[in-house]
């Protein structure tokens, strides 16, 4: 319940900020295309921060239509489509951004997050290695690279990366959380529990942090502790389903089977649960926010919302359209949302 209230508070704060932006949009409207593109991009960022990826995608499309040579709207489209679970469209937009601004660490990081969310850890790792060569001290890149290695079952390499990052920042929450989960996935459950138990008492702790701890408890055979940890965020039926699944994962671990393919938090939430037959999916239930997942050192993301299924083939890259009508529709729609949410 507290996570839900926090999400609503974040949305309300973002809505108030968007209302202020709407009130001041005319400041740059005198320059054809530029003012509208800038205001659309700003509004899109606010919509995305509030979890409204559909509106964000529409507004980033408006910004792209107004300035088809700009790279920033393409990055925003990539993030928004990833949030919607439309990974093919997201990857295409980010690939185009990368072709226009080659080897840019920010773009490569976003592309890698999308690829991780789409189940392409090898492709993500290649992009993260390129990004890391350009920005070796970027903790978000370091953390995402460790996650990609964990998803490939290369836990020892992932742990080495997390520990190297912790030498620079010994208290980094995301690095510690990922290290604890990686240790659990590689069978070092005692140390993983010690790290994650401490983090679960931190003010930054989230349901995912507790889900990671519960899973490592389960891998250690401590089902009572796993159930008690999950009970903070899940109803009894889902708690029991998760504990049963941890039991299956523990069997795989005992037989030397890889269990490390997880969905990273910084790669954006997946709208659909993977098939339960695949041991890599850590939680057999359709609520992504409850899944035990690594955490990435980025700005926090809102709780996932049900989204449409991924399209079988990527849509063509967004093409410039007449900017006047789509911008008016997108911004009018967003103003209506702001007014509706601002009412008591």
Image (cartoon, grey):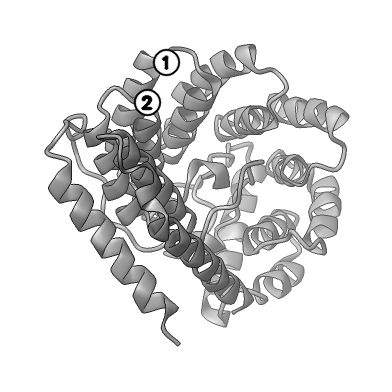
CB-based contact (under 8 Å), mark 1 and mark 2: yes
**Residue 37 place in picture, x, y as percent:** 32, 38
In the figure, is residue 87 to the left or right of 191?
left
Element assignment for label 1: loop
**Residue 43 place in picture, x, y as percent:** 40, 51
> Residue at (59%, 39%) from the top-left corner?
260
Return the residue at label 2. Answer: 71
Residue 248: give its label.
none
Is 283 above or below relative to 262? Answer: below
> Residue at (64%, 33%) from the top-left corner?
140
- The part of the image, by quadrant, that contains residue 323 is top left
Is 293 above or below relative to 210? Answer: above
Q: Quadrant of the N terminus?
A: bottom right
> Residue at (62%, 42%) from the top-left corner?
298
Using the image as rendered, state which of residue 272 and residue 332 is in the foreground: 332
Q: CA distance from mark 1 to mark 2?
A: 8 Å
In the figure, is residue 227 to the left or right of 49?
right
> Residue at (69%, 17%) from the top-left corner?
136
Q: Earlier in the sequence, mark 1 or mark 2?
A: 2
Residue 59 visible here: yes
Return the residue at label 1. Answer: 101
Is 321 above or below relative to 238? Answer: above
Q: Residues within 10 Å of mark 1 (few under 14, many from 20)?
A: few
Element assignment for label 2: loop
Residue 304 visible here: no
**Residue 4 place in picture, x, y as percent:** 55, 74
Using the image as rendered, state which of residue 161 and residue 274 is in the foreground: 161
Q: Quadrant of the C terminus?
A: bottom left
């Amino acid at each position: 319940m507290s996570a839900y209230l926090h999400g609503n508070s974040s949305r309300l704060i973002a809505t108030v900020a968007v209302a202020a932006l709407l009130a001041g949009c005319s400041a740059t409207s005198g320059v054809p295309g530029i003012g509208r593109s800038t205001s659309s991009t700003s509004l899109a960022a606010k919509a995305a921060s509030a979890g409204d990826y559909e509106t964000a995608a529409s507004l980033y499309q408006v910004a792209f239509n107004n300035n088809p040579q700009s790279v920033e709207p393409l990055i925003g489209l990539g993030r928004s489509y990833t949030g919607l679970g439309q990974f093919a469209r997201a990857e295409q937009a980010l690939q185009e951004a990368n072709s226009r601004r080659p080897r840019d660490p920010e773009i490569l990081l976003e592309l890698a997050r999308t690829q991780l969310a789409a189940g392409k850890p090898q492709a993500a790792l290649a992009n993260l290695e390129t990004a890391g060569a350009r920005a070796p001290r970027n903790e978000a890149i370091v953390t995402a690279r460790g996650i990609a290695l964990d998803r490939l079952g290369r836990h020892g390499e992932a742990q080495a990366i997390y520990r190297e990052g912790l030498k620079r920042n010994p208290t980094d929450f995301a690095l510690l959380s990922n290290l604890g989960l990686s240790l659990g996935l590689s069978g070092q459950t005692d140390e993983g529990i010690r790290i994650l138990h401490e983090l679960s008492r931190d003010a930054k702790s989230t349901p995912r942090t507790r889900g990671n701890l519960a899973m490592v408890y389960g891998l250690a055979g401590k089902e009572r502790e796993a159930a008690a940890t999950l009970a903070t965020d899940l109803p009894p039926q889902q708690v029991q389903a998760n504990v049963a699944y941890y039991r299956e994962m523990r069997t795989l671990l005992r037989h030397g089977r890889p269990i490390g393919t997880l969905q990273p938090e910084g790669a954006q939430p997946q709208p659909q649960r993977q098939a339960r037959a695949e041991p890599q999916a850590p939680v057999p239930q359709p609520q992504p926010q409850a899944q035990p997942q690594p955490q990435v050192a980025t700005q926090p993301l809102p709780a996932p919302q049900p989204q449409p299924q991924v399209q079988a083939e990527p849509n063509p890259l967004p093409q410039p359209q007449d900017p006047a009508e789509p911008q008016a529709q997108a911004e009018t729609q967003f103003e209506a949302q702001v007014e509706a949410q601002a009412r008591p």
